[in-house]
Image (tube, helix red, strand yellow):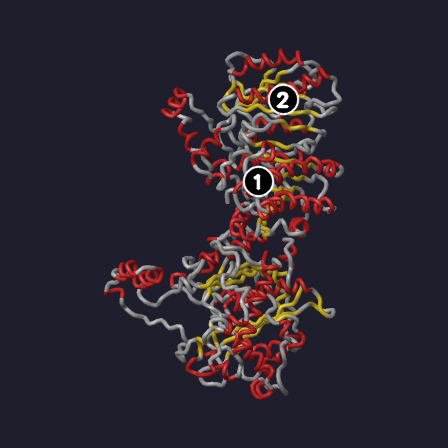
């Protein structure tokens, strides 16, 4: 991965002519803060609901889809066939094959790219990509008995209830299998990792709070003009993302205490307001060949043009855990003969405001461009008026594997509405960082 | 994937079940308590009517109607045989000239009433009294109105009486009159009692009676639950491709209905200025056409007028009538909504008889009826119809919330002594949607079991 020119030199022109894979539309359930509306919903419940909403939107009840791929980051071992089970519980034909995929937070976007490639190759004509995650119904790596007790305990309100639940613990329940929320190789949580990167790129607290505020304002405005009417289907009484605070202000955000990077002393800038909360939710995207969509009189919102994955050595190297997209995007754009100036909409996943701003800072940095990207100078500047214009994860929340589907469906609709720019189809870029120092990025074009 | 779940899943209310057999039946009889019957409801493929149909009347019209019934493979009688059980009596009175002429046919009907089967049907076919009629003719014609409404109250055991009014120049056996007759005879009209349908044009000869809506594309607003969901299911059962519309917040229930009937879900606030255009766009781009529009979505914000505020008043008007007017303008302006176009609005008996605490709701629902009558000429020019259905007490999630005693009284206050089902409203709407009902327009049909208030 270290030499971006290697990938760029392979050149799209050398590939055989493939047919197109298009985005027909998407559906997700509103994202809910952990422990909220979906506290008692499983991954399978949520993914099935997201599938059924998609099926209803496009009249696919009883239809056999070429393949369905989805995944979850936090996954119970009993959900070994999560996606196939969700398909069986949905209104789709039971003869629809499905597989699970897992690439941390990039899971959703990777399902879109993988299935699009199958469509482009002619292996399948239609596909549903998706992802789901529940931090509420998370697997705890202890015995099943203790896990049940702990979840009950978490929900109990009074001391009496708690004692009664605690009294259920038996010695056999106490076989520990220490779960860790951090990176296995560093022991640091994702937030602590990002705090290091945020400090490295000297991202200010104000800049992070401004990005967070814009995310909330943009998402609220999009709901206000009914943008999500054909992208979201309610679930469990929730019809909007529960993390959304349309009335948030810079003052409110400025009043929050830092939660990550506190060991860094005065430099701590990351708060609960400019970091994405743990969230529950699911999303799906309907992909197809042009012929399949046309035969069913279905809309075509966008082409899935190309995608790229990258990884950084965050354990030994100079790069932060969530900086892989900073390498993936230059490679992807170069392969397609594009620059940042050719992009009309940027959808950069807001794991933390600091992640987005560190990435933008790296691209604007001459030194980074020369030494790390092998360019003549800085990679370029992202026009902030084109960035996450309908809000992103800071406002909507981030159910890990579900974010990719949210981004693809939202961007595809935005591109379709925009239509042409300067005589060519409007173009959008998606960038998703992921645990393990990975990143997946993609280009969509309007239809 | 049940597409005709209206009949099988729902049961009669507990009281009706109790008094329908054994000890409960004897007890109710002895105490003179109401004895609601378990109504015969439509099932595709089931016989149109159980038992022979007696066709009464002297003129050519009665012969023609008898012929149609024979074509429908019914067991037709032109004279009553005492003690022989009858499924229905059709009384053809299209040539009435004087009230004295009512005597012979009605006394003959009376003599046959005791021989009616359970859930039998009385259907009159006559002509509406018009200001231009000679007084004696108008008196005779209007007399039928009183007869039907009274006989409906006299009948028991699920039997109903309804009438068909033939506009001048429309023959008794015209396709639109016969489509109406078939509706009244069938289980589709189970909760319609003491009502009239007017056939104002000849109409079209029916194709497939079991799948009358084959090839049609229908949109149903408020389809996520209750009556709207039943309408969507019923139209789909009759062959239509259904676009189920409801507010985004009801999207999960909407998706379940749409998937169940293999239709599509369209999340949309019908009060949006472009709601009509968005519905048209969805229908044309996905299904290539739009034939049937069912305006079902509605809300209640009950308050005595003395306590009413602007928010409650205005929201009811906005959702229940203003949105329909705006959407209809869009539909009528579109070249894609034509040919056999159908608009059917859900009104309410509150809009006919009025209801304490519902001045806003009644305004909207009476408004719907006014709209229907004056939209009819606009659609007639392009071969379409517009009608309204006014439900009475229907067993829904909404009425289930009424306190027990109030609910128990409310559901007995009609000739059939029970609440109707969402499917009963849906059947009436599906009838208006049929191509065969092309001559039936500007009607407001009550589906209320002949509620004691109002007409």
Query: Upstream in the sequence, badge 2 or badge 1?
Result: 2
Residue A272 higher or lower than B185, as above or below: below
- Label 2 residue SS: helix
As drawn, the residue found furthest toward the front would be B306
Counting from the top left corner in percent of width and height, residue B420 is at: 51, 33
Q: Residues within 10 Å of mark 2 (few under 14, many from 20)?
A: many
In this picture, residue A433 sits left or right of residue A168: right
In this picture, residue B46 sits left or right of residue A39: right
List the residue tagged with mark 1: B305
List the residue tagged with mark 2: B145
Pointers 2 and 1 within a single chain: yes
Q: Chain of mark 2?
A: B
Counting from the top left corner in percent of width and height, residue A162 is at: 30, 61
- Estimate the spatial distance between the alpha carbons at disc 2 and disc 1, rounded to whole Å: 34 Å
User: Looking at the rendering, in which quadrant would you find the C terminus of chain B?
Assistant: top right
Counting from the top left corner in percent of width and height, residue B262 is at: 56, 47
Say if residue A361 shows up in the picture: yes
Per the rendering, the mark at residue A87 is: none
In this picture, residue B312 sits left or right of residue B324: left
Residue A251 higher or lower than B79, as above or below: below
Say if residue B241 shows up in the picture: no
Counting from the top left corner in percent of width and height, residue B255 is at: 54, 50
Front one among B261 and B303: B303
Q: Residues within 10 Å of mark 1 (few under 14, many from 20)?
A: few
Front one among A154 and B106: A154
Q: Chain of mark 1?
A: B
Which is closer to the viewer, label 2 or label 1?
A: 1
- Label 1 residue SS: helix
For the image shown, how many numbered marks are present on the structure?
2
Residue A336 higher or lower than A87, as above or below: below
């Amino acid at each position: 991965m270290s030499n971006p020119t290697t990938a760029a030199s392979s050149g799209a022109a050398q590939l055989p002519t493939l047919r197109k894979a298009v985005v027909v539309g998407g559906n997700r359930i509103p994202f809910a803060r952990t422990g909220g509306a979906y506290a008692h919903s499983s991954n399978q419940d949520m993914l099935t609901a997201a599938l059924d909403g998609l099926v209803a939107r496009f009249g696919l009840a009883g239809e056999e889809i070429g393949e369905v791929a989805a995944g979850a980051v936090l996954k119970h071992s009993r959900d070994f066939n999560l996606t196939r089970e969700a398909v069986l519980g949905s209104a789709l034909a039971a003869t629809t094959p499905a597989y699970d995929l897992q690439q941390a937070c990039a899971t959703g976007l990777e399902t879109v790219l993988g299935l699009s490639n199958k469509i482009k190759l002619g292996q399948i004509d239609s596909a549903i990509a998706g992802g789901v995650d529940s931090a509420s119904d998370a697997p705890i790596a202890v015995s099943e008995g203790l896990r049940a007790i702990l979840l009950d305990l978490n929900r109990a309100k009074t001391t009496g209830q708690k004692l009664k639940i605690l009294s259920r613990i038996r010695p056999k329940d106490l076989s520990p299998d220490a779960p860790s929320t951090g990176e296995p190789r560093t022991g640091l949580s994702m937030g602590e990792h990002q705090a290091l990167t945020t400090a490295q790129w000297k991202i200010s607290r104000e800049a992070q709070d401004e990005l967070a505020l814009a995310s909330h304002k943009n998402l609220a405005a999009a709901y206000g003009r009914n943008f999500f009417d054909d992208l979201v289907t309610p679930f469990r009484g929730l019809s909007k993302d529960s993390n959304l605070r349309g009335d948030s202000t810079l003052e409110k955000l400025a009043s929050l205490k830092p939660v990550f990077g506190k060991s860094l002393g005065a430099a701590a800038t990351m708060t609960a307001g400019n970091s994405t909360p743990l969230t529950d939710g699911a999303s799906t995207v309907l992909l197809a060949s042009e012929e399949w969509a046309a035969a069913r009189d279905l809309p075509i919102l966008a082409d899935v043009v190309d995608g790229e994955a990258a990884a950084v050595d965050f354990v030994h190297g100079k790069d932060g855990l969530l900086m892989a997209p900073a390498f993936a995007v230059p490679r992807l754009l170069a392969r397609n003969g594009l620059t940042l100036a050719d992009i009309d909409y940027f959808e950069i996943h807001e794991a933390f405001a600091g992640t987005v701003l560190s990435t933008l800072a790296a691209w604007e940095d001459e030194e980074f461009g020369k030494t790390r990207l092998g360019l003549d100078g800085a990679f370029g500047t992202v026009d902030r008026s084109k960035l996450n214009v309908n809000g992103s994860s800071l406002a909507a929340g981030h159910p890990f594997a579900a974010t990719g589907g949210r981004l693809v469906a939202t961007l595809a609709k935005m591109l379709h509405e925009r239509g042409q720019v300067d005589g060519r189809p409007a173009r959008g870029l998606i960038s998703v960082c992921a645990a393990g120092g990975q990143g997946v990025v993609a280009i969509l074009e309007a239809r | 994937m049940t597409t005709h779940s209206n009949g099988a899943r729902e049961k009669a209310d507990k009281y009706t079940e109790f008094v329908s057999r054994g000890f409960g039946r004897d007890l109710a009889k002895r105490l003179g308590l109401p004895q609601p019957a378990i109504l015969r409801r439509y099932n595709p493929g089931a016989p149109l009517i159980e038992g022979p149909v007696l066709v009464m009347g002297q003129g050519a019209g009665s012969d023609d109607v008898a012929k149609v019934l024979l074509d429908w493979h019914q067991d037709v009688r032109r004279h009553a045989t005492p003690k022989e059980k009858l499924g229905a009596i059709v009384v053809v009175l299209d040539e009435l000239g004087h009230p004295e002429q009512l005597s012979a046919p009605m006394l003959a009907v009376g003599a046959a009433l005791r021989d009616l089967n359970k859930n039998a049907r009385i259907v009159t076919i006559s002509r509406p009294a018009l200001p231009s009629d000679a007084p004696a003719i108008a008196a005779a014609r209007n007399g039928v109105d009183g007869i039907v409404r009274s006989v409906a109250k006299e009948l028991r055991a699920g039997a109903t009486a309804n009438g068909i009014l033939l506009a001048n120049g429309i023959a008794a056996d015209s396709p639109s009159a016969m489509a109406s007759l078939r509706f009244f005879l069938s289980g589709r009209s189970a909760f319609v009692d003491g009502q009239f349908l007017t056939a104002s044009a000849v109409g079209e000869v029916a194709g497939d009676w079991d799948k009358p809506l084959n090839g049609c594309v229908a949109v149903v607003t408020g389809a996520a639950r209750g009556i709207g969901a039943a309408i969507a299911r019923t139209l789909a059962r009759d062959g239509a491709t259904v676009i189920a519309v409801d507010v985004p917040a009801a999207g999960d229930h909407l998706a379940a209905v749409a998937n169940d009937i293999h239709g599509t879900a369209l999340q949309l606030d019908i009060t949006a200025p472009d709601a009509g255009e968005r519905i048209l766009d969805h229908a044309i781009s996905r299904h290539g056409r739009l034939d049937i529009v069912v305006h079902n979505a509605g809300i209640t914000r009950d308050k005595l007028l003395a306590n009413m505020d602007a928010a409650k008043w205005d929201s009811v008007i906005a959702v229940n009538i203003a949105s329909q007017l705006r959407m209809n303008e869009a539909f009528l302006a579109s070249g894609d909504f034509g040919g056999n176009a159908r608009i059917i609005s859900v009104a309410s008996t509150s809009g006919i008889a009025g209801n304490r605490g519902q001045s806003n709701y009644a305004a909207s629902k009476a408004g719907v009826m006014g709209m229907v009558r004056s939209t009819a000429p606009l659609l007639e020019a392009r071969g379409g119809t517009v009608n309204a259905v006014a439900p009475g007490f229907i067993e829904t999630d909404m009425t289930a919330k009424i306190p027990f005693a109030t609910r128990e009284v409310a559901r007995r206050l009609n000739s059939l002594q029970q609440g109707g089902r969402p499917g009963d409203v849906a059947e009436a709407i599906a009838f208006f949607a049929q191509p065969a009902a092309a001559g039936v327009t500007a009607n407001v049909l009550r589906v209320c079991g002949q509620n004691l208030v109002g007409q």
